[in-house]
Amino acid sequence: MQTDEIKSRIGSGLLSFPVTHFDQDLRFSRKNYQDHVARLSQYDAAGLFVAGGTGEFFSLTPSEIIEVLSAAREVVLDTPIICGCGYGTHLAVSIACEAEQAGADGLLILPPYLVNSTQEGLYAHVKAICDAVNIGVIIYNRDNSIISADTLLRLCDSCPNLIGFKDGSGNIGLVREISTKMGDRLSYIGGMPTAELFADAYNAAGMTTYSSAVFNFLPEMALRFFRASCDGDTATTEQLLKDFFFPFAKIRDRQPGYTVSIVKAGLRIVGEDAGPVRSPLTDLTLEEHDMLRPLVEKYR
């Protein structure tokens, strides 16, 4: 797909961020993963983001990232596939080039490993990745990688294939400044953990879509919430927030790293085992699974 088409597609609907399936020895479980993404592709998602944060990008080797991408590419034909990309600049460029060769339609640049950076350093990092490929690139503002509106404007001028901005900082003021200054130059994606909690605020700030981890195990409910949010149906969104998303987030917040772990727990409850998370993450306890079960079963 051309970059303009990718940009338009990802801004048009809910975005799918699948978990990465492992076996009990923590090896990538290709067949189970392919079954999962094929099942999700039956629903109306605007883009499939593989090896992203929910997909445990941070625990995958560079070769595994490409293996996950290739597995998805074999079974998903019509949905744009965006691949996670990150770490230091040279490694990120290498991953980006291999992802392009393996059939990715775009890249999601996750925060560089460990270090905090200057705006000039972040500019050089993103530009090097954009310059290395011809596919679309999306920036993820989060944690130690917060690009300012002025730096993003420079990148938009320098990188024609920069097509999107995803926010995981929750800084609505910065998001609004960026969406105002960049206008329709970019697609805008809400990327806070359990993004449904922030959907109304992001809509007001100019975001047209968001990434949904809950889509992994409750796709119909996730789409119902998304459509209600887009339509201004506050009765539906408030009911789902109260009955599902707020108590879901309360369980998620019991331990660091549960943002991913709780999604795999949700899959187990609906009868699909994506395997354990890799350390340093930990899985939910049996007690926490039991707390989650009635929330999930109500909407499956």
Image (tube, rainbow, N blue to C red):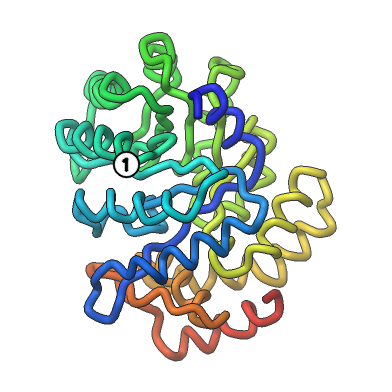
The foreground one among 226 and 257 is 226
Tell me which amino acid carries mark 1.
Answer: Ala
Q: Quadrant of residue 95?
A: top left
Q: Residue at x 58, y 61 (%)?
A: 215
Label 1 sits on residue? 102
Q: Where is the C terminus found, in terms of image quarters?
A: bottom right
Q: Is residue 104 left or right of residue 170?
A: left
Which percent across, then down, holds residue 257? Answer: 35, 65
Q: Is residue 260 above or below residue 171?
A: below
Q: Is residue 122 visible?
A: no
Q: Is residue 194 left or right of residue 100?
A: right
Q: Secondary structure at mark 1?
A: loop
Q: Is residue 228 left or right of residue 127?
A: right
Q: Is residue 152 above or below residue 80?
A: above
Q: Quadrant of residue 79?
A: top right
Q: Residue at x 33, y 76 (%)?
A: 276
